[in-house]
Image (tube, rainbow, N blue to C red):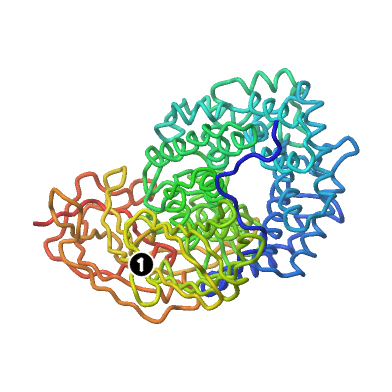
Amino acid sequence: MAKNRETPLRRLPVGSVKPDGWLAKQLDIVNALQKRMGADPSLLEGVNWKGGEIFPRYVRGLILLAGVLGEPQLTVKAEGYMNAIFDAALEGGDLLPEDRDGEAPKTEAVKTLLSFYELTGEQRALTALKKFFKSRFNTMSVTHSWHHARARLLDEVEAMDALYRESDLEWLKDLAEMLRDRSPDWFRLAVRFPYKKAAEKCISPAALKKAVRTISQAESPREGKRVKPFTPEKMEAEWKRPAHQLLVETDGVNMAKAVKYPCTYGAFMGDRELRRLSLRLIANLNRYHGNATGMFSCDRRLGGNSPTRGIDITAAVEMMESLVSVLQATGEGVCADILEQIAFNVIGAAAFDDGSAVQDVLMVNQVECSVRRKEFFAGYPFGNAYARGGITRGSVALLSAYPFFMQALCMMRGADELNFFAYAPCTLDIPVRGSVLRIKEETGYPFRNTVVFKVLEADGDAAVRINFRVPRGTTMQLISGGQVVATGGGVISVKCTLRTGSTFMLKLDIPLLVTTNRDGTHSLYKGNVLMATRPGSEVSVRSYPGGEAAEVNAVTKWSVAPVIAKSSGRRTLYDAERTVVGKMPEKPFDRANAPFELYIRCKNVLNWDFDINGFSLAPTAPKFSEESIERAFVPFGCTSVRMAQFPPCYRG
């Protein structure tokens, strides 16, 4: 089989994109977050790897941050942690964490080894991967695995592909087929998606509870409790049970990872047609579990369309990584739109604006962030409150979020085609025909409507084709030399010659859009920025077993709805919004100082209140006040408590 297979698009080399402006500030906040987490003793004990899959996820976050920030001390820190992964590798090639939390940590370690190799070129990483995959190949027929470890086997394919490009080891192809055979049939799920309701509605609660109990007893047996030996045969039998299949196939992290499998497996095996299955899986997740943020609901498992169901932050970051892979394989702009939605909305809202506290799970409509929510969000120690200090699933995931987003800013096709899929302030070093083209991108997008490109350095005249994606719900003009060169939606494509000093600008028209969600509620967008009300709130910090939590509660009226014009065409506001744009804040997701505000005519919803469990479910037959009042709307990422999906309120 030919070693050099055609790749539709390729990402820029590690370190080619340097953040500027608001993006650099966000990464500084994330960098401060990783420093606080690095002091947590649960990661390492001496030189031994602890913490299950949290440890390799954290180390990979360090590696990705080192790549985008270009800080040598971060690379040195990551190398220190990598020694624990190298030391954990057994002589036979297996990766064995000190505290065995199932088998899933091995797959996370594989991804960390690949990222470390891409950053440093360290041959030890390739050697460890080769030994591990050879061990997998030799023992797969006698290895019995289940639960998340088995559901995520195909997450290792990208590392196998990288190793294959360096070594031409044909048995890696056979191993990839083995992994697919032993995994859930993710490709079938993409074609005929069976989970059209929240996970708990797809199976009896008793069967679900029994499956969870069996897994818990097998993977984390309680000391002193006598249980029957969990034999390989019993493990295989349990894996085949419908309840177990549902547990792994509706898990939010597993599903977010699976989105890229048709693309990554198809690219490795030379079957590019499989990439369409990734797009189908994305569409099905949005149809049956999507919400206004762009991410699908999954408070651990798929949660349907309700805005009061949770969004797992780890799953959201995994989805970002998958979207980059699908974007690279297909070039479909919808992937970039969803990627921007998650980055600007979910990731922006997941932490306090100084990074001092992070949620593991958030809601679209969220008027309370409290520890008592763990009663409903099983497996989240602090419910949907913001955890302060220490390591949580959400805080570890945030380390990788912006580095993934930055991989979509520009991709190459061939030697001279530049594809700008997302926009953010940065400096790019782009290889064009053997030389490097350095371009500075100055923008306040998505909070402002212009993007200016300046060529800082070019080796003579560089003849290139540039494709600019036009974000969802916008139109765009390409301006050069004071003249409009091109205009439109979808994609703007031009051939041009760039030289040192060349400057051109994108000007976007970003109207306020009113959309109808899958559950019949309305939401408001400026491009891919979801707008939300920000009621007055109070924050209290309390100590709980396991650490501190910052709890936030709305203290002013939140049950309102924007007044929409009743028409047969596109939804619009009954009264035009009033826009207030101040100075661009240093932190774009500042809770007290949003980049812009919209003042919109709203009515009070008289019968919108908390249900018996304390959730603010939108009424199916809303009743509205006679009078209306202007309410402020801000970007979703600038809120801790908010409303972003509203019952329909028509007038006219």
Front residue of this view, candidates 491 and 535: 491
- The three-letter code of the residue at mark 1 reads Val
For residue 227, what is the image quadrant? top right
Q: Position of residue 650 (x, y in %)?
A: 15, 54
Residue at (38, 64) in percent of width and height: 554
- So how many labels did they put on this image? 1
Front residue of this view, candidates 283 and 232: 283
Q: Position of residue 229 (x, y in %)?
A: 77, 23
Q: Which quadrant is the C terminus positioned in?
A: bottom left
Residue at (87, 48) in percent of width and height: 87
**Can residue 409 be seen in this snapshot?**
yes
Residue 323 shown left or right of residue 181 in the figure? left
Front residue of this view, candidates 410 and 400: 410
Q: Where is 175 relative to 484, above or below?
A: above
Q: Where is 130 relative to 423, above or below?
A: above
For this orientation, the residue located farthest to the right is 91
- Which residue corresponds to mark 1? 485
For this orientation, the residue located farthest to the left is 652
Label 1: state its secondary structure.
Answer: strand
Q: Position of residue 292 (x, y in %)?
A: 37, 51
Residue at (15, 60) in percent of width and height: 625
Q: Where is 248 relative to 63, above or below?
A: above
Q: Which quadrant is the N terminus positioned in?
A: top right
Q: Position of residue 190 (x, y in %)?
A: 48, 31
Residue at (81, 39) in percent of width and height: 130
Residue 100 shown left or right of residue 10 in the figure? right
Label 1: how many residues lie within 10 Å, few (<14), some (14-19) or many (20+)?
Answer: few
**Can residue 315 be seen in this snapshot?**
no
For this orientation, the residue located farthest to the bottom is 583
Residue 626 shown left or right of residue 598 in the figure? left
